[in-house]
Image (cartoon, rainbow, N blue to C red):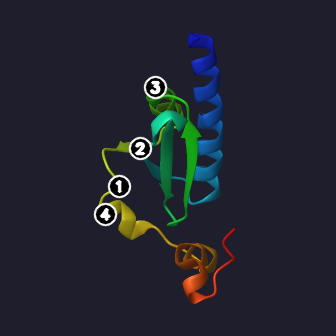
Amino acid sequence: MAADTSKQAARLAKEISAFTRAHGGSAEGQIAYVGQVGFRIVLVAADGTWGDLMAPTKEDAEQALARAEVPAREGFDGEMADRVRTGPYEWSRMAGLQIGGPAQP
């Protein structure tokens, strides 16, 4: 099982590093428990672009951030949220049908 964890963390670290390079060279991460699904790694890059990945365990998430040399914040606080830049896609998804966003299934 430890080898699987290491492989998962390595795969996630590779994705985190690619995201960071593509968006200004630095980022911060925050890990959130989302139940049986696992742990969500939220990333906010230097240019304000955000993204997320799922990890099966907290250890995988922590190890992936460490391998990618991305600092982890305790929470998604106002300072981190203030750096997030959203575009038309995110706004339409957040509002849904209320302002003409994509149709909901």
Q: Spatial distance from mark 1 to mark 3, Cα to Cα? A: 19 Å
Mark with earlier residue (1, 3):
3
The residue that mark 4 highlights is: 79
Q: How many marks?
A: 4
Q: As displayed, is residue 43 above or below residue 63?
A: below
Mark with earlier residue (2, 4):
2
Q: Spatial distance from mark 3 to mark 2, Cα to Cα? A: 12 Å
Q: Spatial distance from mark 4 to mark 1, Cα to Cα? A: 8 Å
Please tell me the numbered disc located at residue 76.
1
Q: Residue at x 49, y 44 (%)?
A: 41
Q: Are marks 3 and 2 in contact (CB under 8 Å)?
A: no
| Kind of residue sitting beneath label 2 | Ala
Mark 4 residue element: helix
The residue that mark 3 highlights is: 59
Please tell me how crowded label 3 is: few (under 14), some (14-19), or many (20+) other residues with Cα within 10 Å: some
Mark 2 residue element: strand
Q: Are marks 2 and 1 in contact (CB under 8 Å)?
A: yes
Name the mark nearer the viewer: 3 or 4.
3
Mark with earlier residue (3, 2):
2
Name the mark nearer the viewer: 3 or 2.
2
Please tell me how crowded label 1 is: few (under 14), some (14-19), or many (20+) other residues with Cα within 10 Å: some
Please tell me the numbered disc located at residue 49.
none
| Kind of residue sitting beneath label 4 | Glu
Q: Spatial distance from mark 2 to mark 1, Cα to Cα? A: 9 Å
